[in-house]
Amino acid sequence: MLNRGAGVPATDGAFFYAPKAQRKLAQGWSGATKAVATEYKESLDIENDPQKKEKWLTRQKGLADRQLKMDALQFSVPDAPETDANDEGA
């Protein structure tokens, strides 16, 4: 007996059978699509509401400032020891 998985409607109204891995992939795709739609709706709300826009801009500026501070800490390089220009390593 074949394990055909659950019946899934095809675009033409017929059913085809998808294995479990394909169903999980489709669920992940659906979740990603919903996330994109939610983000788009939120961005429209921010764009159309001056108070939300100001709050968002303030938050983004704070995050950018924080990132600059973290980058400065992370990428600060201590003074390298001086090397002789004629030294070829060995």
Image: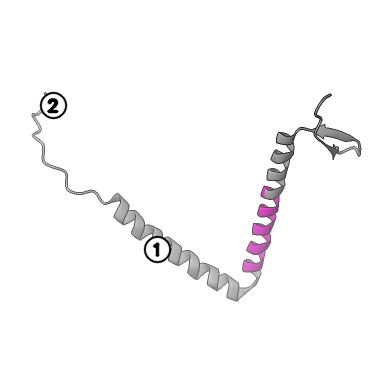
Q: Label 1 belongs to which residue?
A: 65
Looking at the picture, does residue 90 appear above or below residue 24? above
Q: Label 2 belongs to which residue?
A: 89
Looking at the picture, does residue 45 appear above or below residue 23? below
Question: Which residue does the image show at 39% across and 63% down from the upper left?
Answer: 65
Question: Which residue does the image show at 66% across and 67% down from the upper left?
Answer: 45
Residue extending furthest toward the bottom: 51
> Could you say where residue 22 lies in the image, as x and y percent from the top left?
73, 35
Q: Quadrant of residue 81?
A: top left
Side of 73 relative to 12 (left or right): left
Residue extending furthest toward the right: 13
Q: Quadrant of residue 84?
A: top left
Side of 37 relative to 83 (left or right): right
What is the C-alpha distance between the residues marked 1 and 2?
42 Å
Q: Earlier in the sequence, mark 1 or mark 2?
A: 1
Depth check: 36 or 61 in front? 36
Q: Give the crowd class for mark 2: few <14, some 14-19, many >=20 residues within 10 Å.
A: few
Question: Which residue does the image show at 31% across and 56% down from the upper left?
Answer: 72
> Could you say where residue 8 lies in the image, as x and y percent from the top left?
84, 39
* SS at mark 2 in the image: loop
The answer to whether the residues at label 1 and label 2 have Cβ atoms under 8 Å apart is no
Q: Quadrant of residue 47?
A: bottom right
What amino acid is labelled 2 in the image? Gly
Side of 88 relative to 48 (left or right): left
Asked if the stretch drawn in magenta spans residue 42, the answer is: yes
* SS at mark 1 in the image: helix
State the extent of the magenta-drawn residues as a range.
32-46
